[in-house]
Image (cartoon, rainbow, N blue to C red):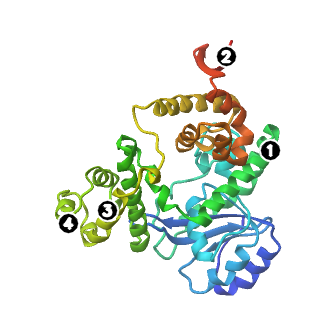
Amino acid sequence: MTVRVATIDDVPSIRAGLVESDVIAIDTEFHAERRYLPALFLVQFRLPGGPTWLVDPLVDGVLPAIAADLRRPTWILHGGRWDMEVLKRALGGLPDEIWDTQIAAGLADTWFPAPYASLVERYLGVEVDKSATLSDWSRRPLSDRQVAYAAADVAELEELWEAIVDRLDDLRRTDLARQACAEARQRAVDGPDPRSAWRSLGAAASLQPQQIAVLQDIVAWRLERAQLTNQPERSTLSDAAAVEIARRQPATRAELAANRRLPKSVHKSADDLLERIRRAAARSDEDWPAAVRRRTPQWQAVAFLEVWASALGEAGSFAQGLVLPRNLLEDVVLAAEEPSVLAVLGDWRGRLVAPALLDALAGREHLGLGGGRLQILRSGD
């Protein structure tokens, strides 16, 4: 494998190679610590039948010069949520199609999110050296070890994708995998929804409905502040502090300051936060977000469906965490009726699990043990 560290003189050759390529394997090296948006320090991509290029975004001119050409071919990447985020900013957008080997593998097996090295070993029998994972990519010059590590991250991507697709073809799920990858790409394009950010806080389920409405606005405020200051969301305001504020709903600076664990940055923006709390507290119950709360029948239903979905994934060779994650199961339970459930699932999930899920919701399926293993049984079995 030929590995080349790009210079400005290489731009014409790189552009020519990209024009001739329909698909490329791509990865990045970035630092996410103490930031909301990761800092990009390297882009590596492999051209089919050609060299592997390492492009340093700290070298003036190279990455901008090839940005449009780099967005043209289909990308193959692995676990690409943050890769797509940093590349979207660095390149001014994303290609129309992106294939993610981690997502594809989650539709071929029960392990999700599976590490790249583990999938390469499982599907290709090749061992990948990951000893430089926590390397300092901001330092220059890059060491020989870093160059080799970065190149290895794309060396097997295309072959890995093809091996997973062979498995998906056997399962008749290749089209589902492409749709799932397209969904992930669209999330990267759209960015996070501030109105849904509260759902990442498990403790929200302990709040009253009106308090959840306040939490929704607090966490949306936190996300906006984190984006504005480029600080991690939980450094801006911890989960525990957000939940406590939603529970107490302070109306003055003094009441807000009663929580000694609040960062100083929150006190600097206290008036803005207090106004958010005031407006959220005044929302009518019709405007409260739907939520599954602890110690309710809905909570029990979601708990049952999580175990059921895990058993379904084991039986059907797919990852429950990808296909039926908890947040989606909560939406299913809240939707209740068949048309709404199908809308929650969407196309590719619906094609894979809708009949079985509707049977479970209707009580036509239940769980049992057979041979020491959890099994899904039909009513009457």
Type of amino acid at the residue the image marks with label 4:
Arg
> CA gap, disc 1 to disc 3?
55 Å
User: At label 2, which amino acid type do we have?
Assistant: Ser
Q: Position of residue 349 (x, y in %)?
A: 69, 43
Q: Is residue 121 visible?
A: no
Picture quarter with the C terminus = top right
Q: Nearer the viewer, residue 35 or 139?
A: 35
Closer to the N terminus: mark 4 or mark 1? 1
Q: Residue at x 59, y 45 (%)?
A: 114
Check contact, mark 1 vs mark 3: CB within 8 A. no
Q: Earlier in the sequence, mark 2 or mark 3?
A: 3
Q: Residue at x 31, y 53 (%)?
A: 246
Where does label 3 land, which residue?
A: 278
Q: CA distance from mark 4 to mark 1?
A: 61 Å
Query: Mark 1 highlights which residue?
Result: 166
Q: Residue 234: image x %, image y %?
A: 36, 58
Q: CA distance from mark 2 to mark 1?
A: 35 Å
Q: Secondary structure at mark 2?
A: loop
Tell me, for residue 253, which label it has, or none: 4
Question: Where is residue 249, by image quadrant?
Answer: bottom left
Question: Which residue was labeled with disc 2?
Answer: 379
| Between 93 and 207, the one nearer to me in the picture | 207
Q: Is 48 left, or right, of 190 in this rendering? A: right
Q: Residue at x 23, y 61 (%)?
A: 251
Q: Amino acid at mark 1?
A: Asp
Q: Earlier along the polypeptide chain: callout 2 or callout 4?
A: 4
